Image (tube, rainbow, N blue to C red):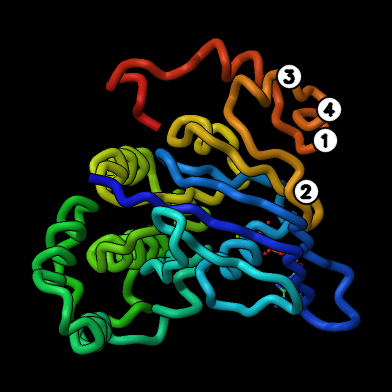
Amino acid sequence: MLNDLMVNIRNLEYTFNQTSMFCLQIKNLEYSFNGVLGMYGLSGSGKTTFSKLLAGIIKPVSGLVSFLTNGQPTFPKIMYSPQFPEKILLGVHIGETVQQILSHNTMSTGVFDSICTYLDKFSLDFDVIKNKSGFELSGGELRRLAIALCLALSPELLILDEPTIGLGRRGKTQLYRVLEEFQQKHHIMIVSHDFNLIRKISGHYWILDRGSLIFSGDLQALEHRQDIVNRVGINALEHYLAATIKTEEQRTL
Ligand SMILES: Nc1ncnc2c1ncn2[C@@H]1O[C@H](COP(=O)(O)OP(=O)(O)O)[C@@H](O)[C@H]1O
Ligand SMILES: [Mg+2]
């Protein structure tokens, strides 16, 4: 059973420093998680920044991000799988890193088994990679490892930032299958500059443009916003609509 979870954003502002040209500004936003949420925007629109603010990894300059469950304030467990897993995993010893994760999560049972199970679903064998360093894994393997670690910690909200970069066709299909199952009991947000991917996985979209949220709605609502479609370069939306995925075979990414 999926927990009720709502995010409430008030006058959120973030800038990197005073000289930065970029400013993220989200005035007021209330959203009840329901199915997979897709965050889309062109490169540099602020997706990663907004995701990290939601996950609490960076703090806003001003404003508030809060979460509610059944109308009550809550602090959900959120896992953020980074856009650049190599920044974190390149120099580390995989086995030791997994040990550290386990020692920080002694309250959660079955985490180790879960890590191995998810790695297996992504065609990675813990016994093979446990003695390796991040340098010895490919970009796609690092990403699958990062995602598997996030999944295994069973967050209430999983945020996947550009999860398919470096994954081949098989890796994308595996990811899609895993998320199909995971979404039954967890909230998921997929962040991508690839609308095709977002469309296949998500039912509700947030669209960012130059640090602002310019759309929150489903495909039907987006269909009526040609201005937004043009502005953020979602080409041939008609084609996407016509190809709405129905069958399992078609769901291969
Ligand atoms: N550490 C940083 N310092 C300064 N500017 C940054 C930093 N990280 C990102 N930016 C800038 O902030 C803007 C938004 O970046 P980001 O949130 O990564 O966008 P997206 O994920 O949509 O590609 C971009 O213009 C980017 O150049
Ligand atoms: Mg990004």
Are the residues flagged by discs 1 and 4 in contact, CB closer than 8 Å?
yes
Residue at image mark 2: 209
Mark 2 falls on what kind of element? strand
Q: What residue is shown at x 64% (from left), y 60% (from top)? A: 9
Name the disc covering residue 231, or none: 1
Mark 1 falls on what kind of element? helix
- Check disc 4 and give the amino acid type: Asp
Distance from disc 3 to disc 4, alpha carbons, whole Å, reads: 9 Å
- Check disc 3 and give the amino acid type: His
- Check disc 2 and give the amino acid type: Asp
On the image, the x and y values in percent for residue 97 come to: 27, 84
Lower sequence index among marks 2 and 1: 2
Between label 3 and label 2, give the one nearer the viewer.
Answer: 3
- Packing grade of label 1 (10 A; few <14, some 14-19, many >=20) is few
- Packing grade of label 2 (10 A; few <14, some 14-19, many >=20) is many
Residue at image mark 4: 227
Name the disc covering residue 224, or none: 3
- Packing grade of label 4 (10 A; few <14, some 14-19, many >=20) is few
- Check disc 1 and give the amino acid type: Arg
Q: What residue is shown at x 47% (from left), y 60% (from top)? A: 68
Lower sequence index among marks 3 and 2: 2
